[in-house]
Image (spheres, coloured by chain):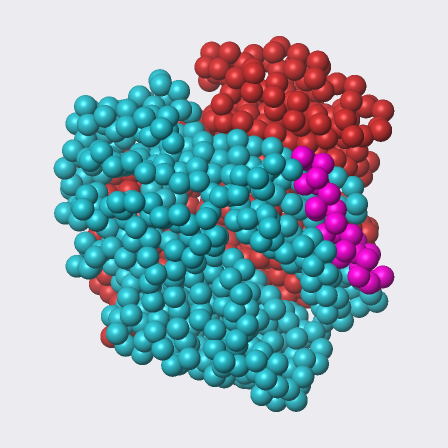
Amino acid sequence: MNASADLLASVLRRASARGATAADGFLVEERQFSASVRLGQVDTVTHSRDQRLALRVFASKASAAASTSDLSRESLERLVDEATALARVTEADPHAGLPDPDVLIREVPPLDLEDPAGHELTPEAKIEIARRAETAALEADPRLTNSDGAEHWDRQARYVYATSHGFAEGYATSAFGVSVAPVAADNGGMQRDYWYTTARHRSALESPESVGRTAAARTLRRLGSRKVKTAEVPVIFDPDTAASLIRSIAGAASGPSLYRRASFLLDRVDTKIAAPSVTIVDDGLIPGALGSRPFDGEGLPTRRTVLVDGGVLRTYLLDTYCGRKLGLRSTHHAARDGSGVGVGTTNLTLQAGAADPKDLIGSVGSGLYVTELIGFGVNGVTGDYSRGAAGLWIDKGELAYPVEEITVAGNLLEMLQRVEGVGNDLILRDRASAPTLLIGRMVVAGN
Amino acid sequence: MLPERFFSDRFNVTPSLMERLLGGSLSGRVDDADIYLEYRINEELVLEENVVKKASRHVSQGAGVRALSGTRTGYAHTDDISIQNLEEAARQARAIADRSSAGGVLAVAGRGKPHDLYTLDETPVAANLERKLDLLRKLDAAARAADPRVTQVIASLASEEIVTLVATASGWTVGDVRPLTRLNVTAIAEEGGRREIGSWGGGGRVAFDWFLGEERWKRYATEAARQAALKLSAVDAPAGTMTVVLGPGWPGILLHEAVGHGLEGDFNRKGVSAFAGRMGQKVASELVTVVDDGTIPNRRGSLNVDDEGTPTGRTVLIENGVLVGYMQDRLNARLMGMRATGNGRRESYAYPPLPRMTNTFMLAGPDDPEEILRSVDRGLYAVSFGGGQVDITSGKFVFSASEAYLIEGGRVTRPVKGATLIGNGPDALTRVSRVGHDLALDEGVGTCGKDGQSVPVGVGLPTLRIDAMTVGGTAV
């Protein structure tokens, strides 16, 4: 970390010398390897090394950002000059500025985010993992006749954050993933589905065989999909599609949507927005979890935040700027994207309920079990929701037959109020996770 | 600016050095190989509440080395362009080929003279910053003036310049300098506690001054305000299968999702596209002819050469309803015994190229747009869209209307809330019954995602009547 911290410190010193009243910088270095296999043959192998230094400068209350992947001395000098020049032409914004130094993290907690040994396999061994996943998928059933391939990837990253106040801290992460997308065919046509596993430790990945078998089962159950009649019915979201719903909730609760008055959650803190069974938590301190990080994109210590508690919206998700703008405090959710500072969640979960998913399905006389959503039909301003769906039709409490070319529509606030069951099957599979979720009534459009 | 000169001056990487690397490290063991150099500047300006919220400038540079052997691809990239790193990348990329037993016959690259589609007097990243900020302030004022219910305006201007140089193993080196800019306005309107959002924009491989021509900027502002205010009175969209009329221009996203992706070479070579094996068959109404054309001057989706060094072209995909062409990169063209069509594109040096669309549109038909609307008793008229997505294998695709109206008794009546439309690629276009004479290309805002790679694209459509399509509203 020392060389990186020194580099950042020199960039921040130059910014001050060029007239910046404050500045902060984020340095990311990444190494990635990925191997894909298709029908048993190596398809694509990719090696990469990347680095990026992102700088934010303040000239009193005016600010600007710049970044570069060229860390040569000449390039970094140009970066600072361009950023300070940009800051001079932007207007003052009374809420702009670095966080107060006394809220910055003091000691970086161990979060078990790194697995150096996990990266040490040879390229051949990594390719073999992808091959095993695909083989397990294709051997599961003779109707699995083709494949869009299997992939195994791993990534190492190091992050350092520093401010012109003299703060500098960093951390390193590992990530691993295996995915496979088999294709099945019968007289009714072709279907593809997929499954994946991802984790910070190689040992926490599902086995390649298990990923392959799950992908096979998900693909096979789509064969013979049909369209259904348009109807207003109960809809059950499987854990992965339910996770996409809570990502939409978090987006509407994010600071920039609120100060723009462009959110269906505006003015709703401490009001009931969902059924009592709905509790949504963002916890960035879960050891070894994919979304965990010791501090946010502005150096504030990560926390556990209860976003929705028993149906009541408890807080918004804020970085320093949004907090000041809304007369609130940062909730330590600053995220650095390529171009600046935004708001982002860590490990976002809909907390598990008591219901066995089988009982949730059993409680539905006629309805839809959603396994895939496509498209972008979520309006964060109004909460209006309309997306393409595929899944299984529920008839008399049983998963009866696969369905496709249909949409599910409603309004997110109404959908949250109509949650009638939350499954007990929460698994932290990804950065956003949810158990099976039953929504009492939505419109399914088909024939 | 000459790309060859740019990379040799800045990084000491010359075409002859790249050729030596391709010859020495890669030849004889692979079917094809290339080195791709890229230097990119992005500038982003965002005005919100009449204050510059974001002013940022980003530089990225890098090199990707690719080796191809049979169906195998080895790819390595580095963001530190130096001969040592290129040699290391070539070694990593080649490792893939060493496992091959193939003889190592070089494929012939798609040579040809690059086009000259976007030479500008002044590149958008170089235009004066104060002038840009002034325009954003004028946009803010224009959107607010357009409708008193507008409470928030976000105006943004993104400008980019990419310098590329590709050297292929067959000794062909070609570069390109690509300007790109996009101006966008988002308006939020409020009335009686109801809030709605409207958004409009445009751009292309054009100079900053293009936005001032024909008062384009002003139209973006008034359209965003109009759309937001209109939606305040929108009723619930209908649910179910009905006749859908699409307006001209941006609704061409239908083609992009319904047939475009399904006709990309890789999905067909692998047999995973719903269109695989259907060449020469009827996949649309005889009224339908769809082309992909990367050679239209100054368009967002156009390229002088693709990211493998092949000049772009005009590829007819569907002619009078019959499937006649795929979009190809070098790899898939070679494996399918076809010609590279100049559709090999990548988001950046960090990715190997894939077959991708450029500007995809349907040719105009004979009908009067007004008359097409009059022909519908009950249906949906959709004129503006958000994003879309497709499942290549099942063929199911969606696209989300952001401005749509009910058609009742041949008349366009009430605006409806946004709704997703869903269809099946191989048969959606068989239900096209009327095609307008009003072909328009979109304003220049499209971005397409595939395998995690985003590239700028264009679409276009004349007014179109589709006799049955599922509309995902909430009004049963």
Is any part of residue B45 visible from this angle? yes
Q: Is residue A188 magenta?
A: no
The percent coordinates of residue B313 (x first, y second) are 65, 34
Percent coordinates x, y for residue A86 in the rendering: 25, 32
> How many labels sit on residues?
0
A138 part of magenta stretch: yes
Chain appearing in cyan on the rendered image: A
The quadrant the N terminus of chain A occupies is top left
Q: Is residue A238 above or below residue B296?
A: below
Q: Residue at x 36, y 44 (%)?
A: A336
- Give the percent coordinates (x, y) of residue B130: 23, 33
Q: Which chain is rendered red in the image? A: B
Find residue B253 and report its image quarter: bottom right
Q: Residue at x 69, y 53 (%)?
A: A208
Q: Quadrant of residue B179?
A: top left
Res A298 → quadrant = top left
Residue positioned 74% across, 26% down in the render? B32
Residue A140 percent location from the top left of the image: 80, 61
Q: Is residue B439 visible?
A: no
Range of magenta residues? A122-148
| In the foreground, B311 or A196 | A196
Name the side, left or right, on which B54 lies relative to B312.
left
Residue at (57%, 80%) from the top-left corner? A356
Assign the C terminus of chain A to one quadrant of the image: bottom right
In-front residue for pair B105/A359: A359
